[in-house]
Amino acid sequence: MKTDGNKKIISLHLRTHAFCVKMDNGYKEKIDLTKLPRHIAIIMDGNGRWAQEKGEDRLYGHYHGVNSVRSVVEGASELGIGYLTLYAFSTENWDRPMEEVTGLMELLVQTIRKEVPQLNKDNVRLKVIGDLSMLPPEAQREMNEALKETENNTGLTLVLALSYSSRWELEKAVQNIAMDIQNGKLNADDVNQSTLEKYLSTVDIPDPELMIRTGGEHRVSNFLLYQLAYTELYFTNDKWPDFDKEKLFKAVWEYQNRERRFGKTGEQIRNK
Ligand code: IPE
Ligand code: IPE
Ligand code: MG
């Protein structure tokens, strides 16, 4: 009797487990491939807390975060997403303890060195936005090489936001516009939104339709402030090392179930 009872429990457990796995894995099939976001941007947050919960050093979380990057890049490529922007390091992150900053820069160099062959295999083109001049020389070299080695790829464009912040970007844009006006290259009366967009680091990159932030915080932390004007925001409590392509598929599916109104009424959108 006892064994039978255990068998029943085990079988119920297995079935429940299979059901859960299925629930988590079923989103890719539900996605409408004709209505994909062209550009997904992600604030990869929660590495430090993920590691600290396990009694480990914050860097342990950053190392594990690389697996999530790999999975999400793979997932975006599988779907046929055009642009994936990953917020990897902010202007403000330079103020973190020196060991963490140094560790992150080392991880960056190692990761790029290791991943470029795979990016090429997957036809992924790498791009960077941010103040690269702030990076250690070795990281700059590695990055420039990776950019060159992947520049002819025609699949997903992977944009790394590195030493990036929106206010830095806007400050630079305004400075350059002012300089071009001063040099007679630009007329102040002609400056409009499309001029400004040409001076942003995201020139030639469409605005993101979907922005995901992991790690449970509900803020944008100086990320693409101008470009996110009409982006759908998706927040999850999953910390970045626990995020993967299945969770990306779930976010895309949820995005597809939202109504984007751009200031119009729901009726106007539905009767289009
Ligand atoms: C995001 O994780 C990665 C970077 C900012 C470089 P955090 O390091 O911010 O992790 P938490 O938010 O402290 O958990
Ligand atoms: C945002 O995360 C920056 C990156 C993920 C690179 P932070 O951890 O720096 O953001 P705050 O400080 O919680 O706003
Ligand atoms: Mg954080």
Image (spheres, rainbow, N blue to C red):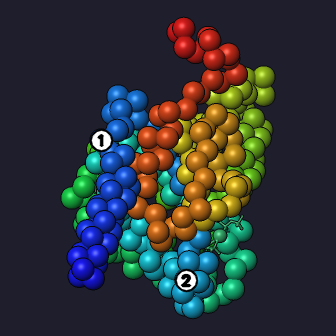
Residue 39 visible to the viewer: no
Q: For the residue carrying disc 2, how many other residues have a C-alpha within 10 Å: few (<14), some (14-19), or many (20+)?
A: many
- Residue extending farthest to the top is 271
Q: Amino acid at mark 2?
A: Ala
Tell me the tag on residue 134.
none
Cα separation, mark 2 vs mark 1, equals 33 Å
In the depicted structure, whether residue 235 falls above or below residue 241: above
Q: Identify which residue, 216 or 187, lies in the foreground.
A: 216
Q: Is residue 111 rendered to the left or right of residue 203?
A: left
Q: Identify which residue, 268 or 142, lies in the foreground.
A: 268
SS at badge 1: helix
Tell me the tag on residue 51.
2
Q: Residue at x 45, y 80 (%)?
A: 63
Some atom of ligand 1 lies within 8 Å of the CB belonging to the residue at label 2: yes
- Residue extending farthest to the front is 1
Q: Residue at x 60, y 38 (%)?
A: 231
Q: Amino acid at mark 1?
A: Glu
Tell me the tag on residue 29.
1
In the depicted structure, whether residue 11 falls above or below residue 262: below
Q: For the residue carrying disc 1, how many other residues have a C-alpha within 10 Å: few (<14), some (14-19), or many (20+)?
A: few
Q: Residue at x 62, y 89 (%)?
A: 99
Residue 137: where, in percent of width, then height? 51, 77
Which of the four quarters of the rendered structure image does ligand 2 lie in?
Answer: bottom right
Question: Do labels 2 and 1 touch, CB within 8 Å?
Answer: no
Residue 142: where, in percent of width, then height? 41, 72
Which of the two discs, 2 and 1, labels the residue nearer the N terminus? 1
